[in-house]
Image (cartoon, rainbow, N blue to C red):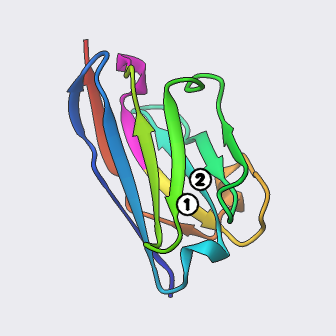
Amino acid sequence: QVQLVESGGGLVQAGGSLRLSCAVSGRTSSTYFMTWFRQAPGKEREFVTGISRSGENKFSADSVKGRFTISRDNAKNTVYLQMSSLKPEDTAVYYCAAQSADYLQLYPESYDYWGQGTEVTVSS
């Protein structure tokens, strides 16, 4: 049974930074393409950024390019999301998700495993 556990969320002022972590257990993280999604109140879950199994290929939504960076440490079975220059519109619950296919898929229903989410609130 694969489990994903996010951490690192919190309250931050606009312009600040946070680093989220997603710990993978049950199988080695290198087995999965990993993606961060987010869901703001009253909105649908949306793609934020994804990383291939090896970490060589990364993809990001236009809204976070240049501000958010995804990375992974397969030795630690952990995926990270470094968020900088945060804006109030980044406020959401952030979820990490895993899929076996090693290519980007933008839709949440394509993912096999999900974490419970970590809340990020950006104050203006």
94 shown above or below 88: below
Magenta span covers which residues?
Answer: 87-94
Residue 91 part of the magenta segment = yes
Residue 39 part of the magenta segment = no
The residue where tag 2 is placed is 35
Q: What's under tag 1, amino acid-wise?
A: Ala
Is 106 positioned to the left or the right of 91 in the image? Answer: right
Identify the image quadrant of residue 3: bottom left
64 shown above or below 4: above
What residue occupies the far top of the structure in this picture?
A: 124
Q: Residue at x 70, y 58 (%)?
A: 52
Label 2: how many Cα within 10 Å (few below 14, some 14–19, many 20+): many
Is 53 positioned to the left or the right of 36 in the image? Answer: right
120 shown above or below 90: below
In the rendered structure, are the residues bearing label 2 and label 1 in contact, judged by CB atoms less than 8 Å apart? yes
Is 68 positioned to the left or the right of 93 in the image? Answer: right
Q: What separation in Å lies between label 2 and label 1 (alpha carbons)?
A: 5 Å
The residue where tag 1 is placed is 97
Q: What's under tag 2, amino acid-wise?
A: Thr
- Between 29 and 111, the residue placed more toward the observer is 29
Q: Residue at x 53, y 45 (%)?
A: 70
